[in-house]
Amino acid sequence: MGENEVQEFLTYLASERKVSTSTQNQALSALIFLYRHVLHKELDLPTRLITAKRSTHLPAVLTPTEVRKVLQYVGDTAGLIARLLFGSGMRLQECLRLQVKDIDFGNHCIIVRSAKGANDRSTLLPETLIEPLQYQLKTIQLIHQKDLKEGCGETLLPFALSKKYPNAGKEWVWQYVFPASQRSIDPESGVVRRHHYHPSAVQKAVRRAAQKAGLDKRVTPHAFRHSFATHLLEAGCDIRIVQELLGHNIKTTMIYAHVLNRGPKAVRSPLDSIN
């Protein structure tokens, strides 16, 4: 089988199986890998294939009242993380990977390192979280000092910095703001480290909080990021500023204009004008 059969199979996936674009792309990538690295043959596929239709999903957005209800049921470290997600618009993994050096209390901002697209950006540090975050840092500093005394305390450094600066991993500024409660062994290096807080713990805590709050929406930690953007736009914030805070392109940020509390595209229903 060659190019014709591969093309027919990909068309079949899109037209008959109704798969998503990502599933069709995954099948194509697998076939290219098979032919190139196993069969040692390059596929000469046409540039125009019948592709699966890319679906558009509007984000789930919480109202201020719903956010307040959910947050009151999320406690401890997960609660602080949830508040920071809503207050800064960060993704969950971006928040969990925060290190001590990334929080700038003086300038009231947070530096998000190597975000989506491998770019750094800055976002808001909520005033109401300054004191809780400072308390969090004091707490984990004691944990870090204890780890150092016990011969641990080394965190995972990005890229190849651990080779360039062998002792930097034990410095305070490189420690995670939200470390795990237990140390673990790095499967690659064998070094005992304290990884960051596990994302599933936050996801479960938020899901339980939404159930306790009685919300009939699917609430995930990412919903706080969507709500952050939508609430800023509702307050009249320039969409270009929201774009920079989220690290989006303008097209992606425009999605939030469709879910403002004034209806799609902020248009008022004519029925409301006659009542």
Image (tube, rainbow, N blue to C red):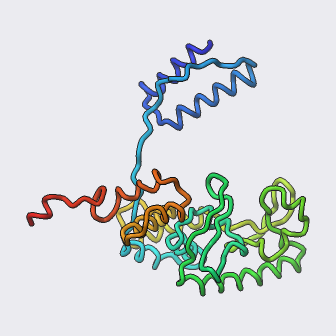
Does 183 sit above or below residue 218? below
Looking at the image, which residue is at 51% across and 64% down? 221
Quadrant position of the N terminus in the picture: top right
Give whichever of 30, 100 is nearer the camera: 100
Answer with left or right where residue 191 lies relative to residue 8. Answer: right
User: How many discs appear?
Assistant: 0
Looking at the image, which residue is at 66% across and 78% down? 104
Q: Position of residue 171 (x, y in %)?
A: 83, 74
Q: Position of residue 147 (x, y in %)?
A: 83, 77
Does 20 sit above or below residue 74? above
Q: Position of residue 25 (x, y in %)?
A: 56, 33
Answer with left or right where residue 69 lies relative to residue 178. Answer: left
Direction left: furthest residue? 274
Does 25 sit above or below residue 190? above
Quadrant housing residue 5: top right
Does 131 sit above or below residue 155? below
Q: Is residue 105 visible?
A: yes
Answer with left or right where residue 87 lies relative to residue 94. Answer: left
Q: Is residue 207 visible?
A: no
Answer with left or right where residue 106 lies relative to residue 151. Answer: left
Q: Position of residue 31 (x, y in %)?
A: 63, 25
Looking at the image, which residue is at 39% across and 52% down? 58
Give whichever of 73, 238 is nearer the camera: 238
Quadrant position of the C terminus in the picture: bottom left
Give whichever of 189, 109 is nearer the camera: 109
Looking at the image, which residue is at 63% across and 52% down? 117
